[in-house]
Image: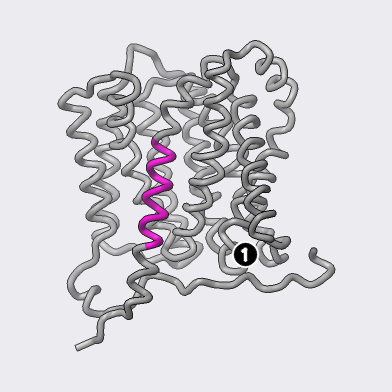
Amino acid sequence: MSTPPPASARRAEMTAAAAAAVTVVLWASAFVSIRSAGDAYSPGALALGRLLAGALTLGVFCLVRRETWPPRSAWRGIAISGVLWFGFYMVALNWGEQQVDAGTAALVVNTGPILIALLGARLLGDPMPPRLLAGMAVSFAGAVTVGLSMSGEGGSSVLGVVLCLLAAIAYAGGVVAQKPALGSASPLQVTTFGCLVGAVVCLPFAGQLVQEATRAPASATLNMIYLGVFPTALAFTTWAYALSRTTASRMGATTYAAPALVVLMSWLFLGEVPGLLTLLGGVLCLAGVAVSRSRSRAAARAAVPEVVPEHRPEQAPDSAR
C-alpha cells in the first residue's frame, strides 16, 4: 500500500483550496458592485478605474513585502495574461453584458473554464480525468440555468454575443499563459505586473474615466474602488497562489461556484428572492465543483500530491531589474 501524503503537503493543499475559495467569493461579490458602478461608468472607464485601484493596492503590498522585479522568464506569461485577462477581458465583458441578457451571457461566458481545460490539456499537459469533465458539465448546466432564470426581458445582440465569447477566450488564454509564469515569479509579482499591463492597455479610456468620475455618484465610484481592491488585487492574488499549486483545469472548474454565490448575494444585498429554477441551478453549480475537485479512491491511494511545492522566485540578473 502507498503511504499517505505528508502532513505538510496536506496543509499546503488545504491552504490552496482556501485561497481558491476566497477568490470565488470575491469574484461573486463583484456582481453586486458592477451593477452599481456600471450605471455610471462606461465599460472601458470602469475597467481602467478598477485596474488603477487594483494596481495601487498591489503596489503597496509589494513595497511592504519588498518584492523584486519579476525574472525575465516570467514576463512572457505576465504580459500575455495582463493584455488578455486584466485588460481585454474586463472591457469586453463589461461591454458585452450591456448588450445581452443574463441567460445569454451565462451561456457564452461560462464556456471559459471549458476552454481553460482544453487549452491546459493541449499547451500545459494538464490531465483531464472523467470526474473533472463530468463536474464541469454539471456546473456549466447549473450556470446556464442560473443565468436563464435571472434574465429580464432584455434582448441579445450579435455584438454582445461576440463580445462575451471574446471575453471567455481572453479569460482562458490569460489563465493558461499565467500558469508557466508562476514557476519563476511569486503570485504577488505575477498579479501586480499583470494588473499594471492591463491598466496600460486600458489607458485610451482615461479621458472617459475622468469625465464620468466628475458626474458619477459617490456610491458608484466607491463600488469601482471596491472592485479594484478586493475582486482584483486580493482575489487575483489568491487565485495566482492557488493556481501555482494545482492545474489550470481544476482552478477553472472551481470558478463555477461563483454563480451559486451570486444568487445568495443578490438575495442578501439586492433583495432579489431566487426562484426554484435559480436555486436548482445554484445547487448544480456547487455539485459540479464538488465532483470536479474530487478524486477517485485509486487516485487517493496513489498518494501523488496535486500540490506543487512552493517555488522561490529566482534572482533576476542586473540586466533584468
**Element under disc 1:** loop
Question: How far from the left and from the top, in percent, is residue 42?
Answer: 60, 20
Question: Which one is in front, 7 or 96?
Answer: 7
Magenta span: chief secondary structure: helix
The amino acid type of the residue labelled 1 equals Ala
* Magenta region: 15-28
Residue at screen point 28% across, 55% down: 133
Residue 185 pos. (x, y %): 62, 64
Quadrant of the image occupied by residue 67: bottom right
* Residue farthest along the left direction in this orientation: 276
- Badge 1 is on which residue? 185
- Most distant residue in the front direction: 64
Residue 92 image position (x, y, % from top left): 55, 31
Left or right: 166 as drawn, with respect to 102: right
Residue 22: in magenta span: yes
Q: Residue at x 58, y 30 (%)?
A: 225
| Total count of labels | 1
Against 41, residue 20 (above or below) is below
Q: Is residue 180 above or below residue 263?
A: below
Q: Quadrant of residue 190?
A: bottom right
Location of residue 261 in the rendering, given as x and y in whole percent from the top left corner: 31, 36
Q: Residue at x 45, y 32 (%)?
A: 30
- Say few, some or many: other residues with alpha carbon within 10 Å of mark 1 (under 14 / 14 to 19 / 20 or more): many
Residue 53 higher or lower than 38, as above or below? below
Q: Which image quarter holds the C terminus?
A: bottom right
| Residue 235 falls inside the magenta stretch | no
As drawn, is 163 to the left or to the right of 258? right
Please identify the residue farthest to the right as the structure is shown. 319
Q: Residue at x 20, y 68 (%)?
A: 296
Colouring scheme applied when the structure was drawn: one colour
